[in-house]
Image (tube, rainbow, N blue to C red):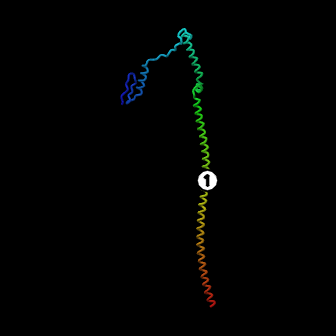
Amino acid sequence: MGKPNKRKKDIIIDYENLDVQDIMDQIKKKIESQPKKSPLKRKVPGGEGSFWGKAEEMEEMEGLKGKIKQLLLRGIRPFSPLIKLLVLPVHQEIREAHRSLHHAHKRLDNLEKMNSNLEQKIKELSTQLNRTQEYVKLLHNLSHNTVVELSKLKIEEENIKIKNRIMEKDLEFLSKREKTLEKKIYS
């Protein structure tokens, strides 16, 4: 498992003991050991003495062309995003993104409308709930007061009954007394 990978002129990595600095040194040595490539020279079409002229003249023209090209590229650089926009087929992607954003905005607007409607309904329901709570409180107080008044009336009725019985007894007593007195007087 932990065997280092050894190949000819390859980088050796010991996976059990990783040493980043050693790996970087190996990479640098490998790069230095590779042969350096010389830049490619352009071949002049038709060779020397052709329609294009001599190779030396072409090199002078290429130097001048290179400078002009660099100047043009520097001048165009601020406009490169616009050029890329015009050249690349981005228009369709922008339209699709705009369309999807438009649909998203419509959905958000609909959701906001629904949210405002729901908030309005919630407010209405809360006012109705407050009213019903007040009605329940009033009904509770009314029923409580009714029970209290009925209790008072019951007690008063009992008192009146008792007084009525007492008066009946008094009336009986008085009628007996009257009868006895009449008997005594008339006898």
Residue 88: x percent and y percent? Answer: 57, 26
Q: Residue at x 63, y 90 (%)?
A: 186
Residue 187: x percent and y percent? Answer: 62, 91
Residue 74: x percent and y percent? Answer: 58, 21
Disc 1 secondary structure class? helix
Q: Residue at x 58, y 30 (%)?
A: 92
Q: Residue at x 57, y 28 (%)?
A: 89
User: Which quadrant of the view contains residue 6?
Assistant: top left
- Count the labels in the image: 1
Return the residue at label 1. 128
User: Which quadrant of the view contains residue 20?
Assistant: top left
Q: Residue furthest top?
A: 49
The N terminus: image quadrant: top left
User: Which quadrant of the view contains residue 164?
Assistant: bottom right
Q: Residue furthest bottom?
A: 187
Determine whether, in the image, residue 20 is placed left or right of residue 98: left
Residue 14: x percent and y percent? Answer: 38, 28
Depicted 183 relative to depicted 55: above or below: below
Q: Nearer the viewer, residue 128 or 92?
A: 92
Depicted 101 relative to depicted 118: above or below: above
Depicted 60 relative to depicted 175: above or below: above
Give the crowd class for mark 1: few <14, some 14-19, many >=20 residues within 10 Å. few
Depicted 46 relative to depicted 122: above or below: above
Q: Amino acid at mark 1?
A: Gln
